Structures are given as C-alpha cells and as structure tokens.
Image (cartoon, helix red, strand yellow):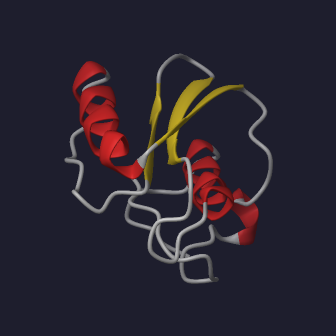
Amino acid sequence: MAMAGKNDAEWNPPARFDHAYTGQLTVRYLPQKKVVAACAKLFAEYKVATRSSFTQRGCSAITGKTTYTVIVIDKTFGLATPKAVLRHEIGHCNGWSASHPD
C-alpha cells in the first residue's frame, strides 16, 4: 500500500520503477475524503494486509494477473498533486515495495 504524499523526490519511485505500467491499469480519481473509504474497500476486497489512513492520498492493489487498480485524489491535497500520487502508485504497480526501499 502507498500513502503517497509530497510532490518531490522523497515520494517518487526509484528510477527502475518510475515508468509506464504495461499491464491493464484502472485509475479512479476521487475527493480525498472518498479516497480513504475507497482504499479501505479495495484493500478488503483484494485481501491487502494494510489499512487506509485519514490523510491518504492514493492507493493501489493488484486486481488480476497483470491488472492493477489505482485510486488517486482528484485535486491537490496538502502538497500532493494527483499527478504526483499517480506516479507514486504506478511505481508500486511496477514492483516498488510498499515499504518504499530505494
């Protein structure tokens, strides 16, 4: 799970994960307050062993063999832009661990 945040290098995926996802990608843009509930539902439905947070900006989960669902804020929240959050989440789709190693 990702709780994507700032639009800076701290939140950008490492270069090896920072590219377009080649599988099927479903992206849902929602108001931040709805992101929290949508991520909790996504995690429960696909048995992702993590929790959502009230400040969550986005999340992603594998929903098929090569299919990912990404949920992203629909407007800037804090310092996070939808574009930065999507970049962060696609990094996870490309194999970047939820623990955010370099």
Q: Furthest residue to the bottom?
A: 9
Name the side, left or right, on which 29 lies relative to 15: left
Give the quarter of the image for residue 54: bottom left
Which residue: 34% across, 57% down?
Answer: 56
Using the image, determine if residue 15 lies above or below residue 36: below
Q: Is residue 56 above or below residue 79?
A: above
Task: Write the residue at 63% across / 22% down.
Answer: 66
Of residue 26 and residue 20, the one placed in the foreground of this image is 26
Left or right of residue 61: residue 85: right
* Vertical position of residue 16 compared to residue 58: above or below: below
Q: Is 20 on the left or on the right of 74, as rendered?
A: right
Q: Residue at x 26, y 36 (%)?
A: 37
The correct choice, above or below, for 58 with respect to 64 in the image is below
Quick check: 81 left or right of 83?
left
Near-viewer residue (6 or 92): 6
Q: Nearer the viewer, residue 21 or 59?
A: 59
Residue 91: image location, x then y, percent:
62, 54
Looking at the picture, tell me which residue is in the foreground, 94 or 2.
Answer: 2
Measured as percent of width and height from the top left, residue 49 is found at: 21, 40
In percent of width and height, residue 99 lies at 37, 65
